[in-house]
Image: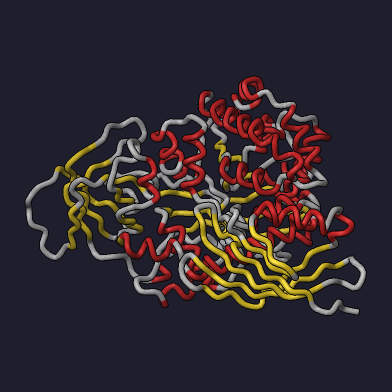
Amino acid sequence: MKKSLMCVPVLILASSLWGQSASPLLLKNANLVALGGGVDQTGRDVLLENGKIVSLRPASNKPHPGIEQIDASGKWLIPGLIDLHANLGAGDSIAVRQDLLELLSAGVTTILDLDGANTAAANHGQDLNPPPTLRIFSGCRLLPAAAANHASAPGSILIKNEQEAKQAVRTAKARNASVIYLDPRLEGNLVKAALQEAQALNLLAAGAALDFSFEEAARHGINWLYDINSLVSASLSGGERKKFAQAWAASPSALYGVKTEKLFFEAWDKIDPAKEGRKKMGLLASRAVFVAPMLAWEEKRFEEFVHTAHAGRAPKIREKFQALLRAAFDLQVPLVMASGYSAEEYWRPSLHDEMAAWIAAGLAPRFVLEAATINAGHALRQHDLGQIGEGMRADVIVLDEHPYEKFAALRQPFMVIQNGRAYGREALQRWRFSPARSQREIRAILRWQEQAWNDGDLERFMRGYWKSDSTVFASGSMSRGWQTMLARYQRGYPTPEKMGKLKFTIAQIDLMSAEWAKVLGEWELRGLPQTPRGWFTLVVRRFEEGWRIVHDHTSSATPAN
């Protein structure tokens, strides 16, 4: 996921590139949420200076001349959140900066960009006032040479033999990457060689759906596994596991597509969460192999990409996802948070979505929050992260309510402090919904519709429209209502052969407000006689579930010769 042998270096403290650390800051009369077996602390003065928490004492009226003070009476403090899988992609510097601001607005103060952090944002961060700060660790992805066409990420190295695998790890270490990510398409001998070298160099190693057992993963020194599908792969035979891993690596969403969904469903049909939990996950606990389930990411992909004919199987699969997470927790597998946040996805899963999925699975808010703070710091071997205490990093979220009583309060923090610099609610709200983000999400909706159409799945294609009787479609004649539109498409395109291959070209997107936009573009159906094509004008609206088309006016042009 770049053919270059470059691994992007870790930015231990991105704020060092964007400006000096903030002036001393005192949080007066704050309450601290208990983590790691402790108890809540109330009425504390917390002094932040030089990017650290330098003192934490009972509140007093003692004057502190020259120090900025914030009245935190009635507020609750938790550590900044750590996301162990946030893919910034390879966008331009403006887009990457917006990704960082969006993450910061959600209380995420540290990320691991598993595919290699895009440092373009750091070069232009000073353009913003105040400049954003985010602690970024980067990964280096090891890919088999045969996957060259997928090597698009900034931090990828292609390898074809054991010697190259060892050299790739040494290159990652020399370029200050924090983690090597072992692509599931790697053959077992390359994986083992890379893991041995990583262990010798004290470099972290991660993987998902790997082509070897949990026993081998633990024995050879893997530090954490990503994705709930890593757990299902462990229940399969070697040959089945290899097919599953290769399908997952080629495209996670393709697991649920028409070509590979049979393999996916057969794998999950074999899973007995209680049995597999005891047999397969116990070793992960004994060897302290961290697991980042990415449950919300997996559930959302399943919901959006599974072929409509199999959508009825979703509830059963979801129950197994949740049962496996509970089994891992009961066995004391060290769990950490990773969202899979991606600059390229229209629905952009957040760490909040992941935490909500864990709570829906039955885990208590306290343990969910610990996975995104203390545990994640330990997984990165950064023991001054993820905690509030003297000597810890000055990364703090200030909440209006106790999160164990109202977990949703995390989504709307009163303030986020990163490296001692405070960002208030107004700025956080502004960064949460930006024009740049809206444009990317709208474009991604149309890419998603393209894929659904080209899979021959009209119902999934129609999920891009507002499911309402008020939705309008005009092309030759006007029809109103989501169901009426679906029936119209089904009459006009009764088989995949008659659908052709859809291609959208977006000419422009006009944002009329934070919740409304207009899209002008061209459509084309390839692979059909005369290649039908034309123009479309869409009115799209932001709903809780994301942007949806509410009005579609499509015209046909003279077919191309």
Residue 23: give x, y in percent of width and height.
24, 65
Q: Residue at x 44, y 72 (%)?
A: 125
In the image, residue 518 above or below residue 472: below
Between 521 and 419, the one lying in front of the other is 521
Q: How is the image coloured?
A: secondary structure
Image quarter of the C terminus: bottom right
Q: Residue at x 82, y 67 (%)?
A: 525
Residue 211: give x, y in percent of width and height.
75, 39
In the image, residue 103 above or below residue 316: below
* Left or right, residue 47 beside residue 437: left
Residue 417: give x, y in percent of width and height.
32, 57
In the image, residue 68 above or below residue 304: below
Q: Residue at x 65, y 67 (%)?
A: 552
Q: How many numbered circles does the render carry?
A: 0
Residue 260 seen: yes
Residue 139 seen: no
* Left or right, residue 433 beside residue 2: left
Between 332 and 306, the one lying in front of the other is 306
The answer to which quarter of the image holds residue 472 is bottom right
Residue 371: give x, y in percent of width and height.
46, 39
The answer to which quarter of the image holds residue 241 is top right
Between 17 and 398, the one lying in front of the other is 398
Between 217 and 486, the one lying in front of the other is 486
Image quarter of the N terminus: bottom right
* Left or right, residue 148 beside residue 16: right
Q: Residue at x 59, y 53 (%)?
A: 468
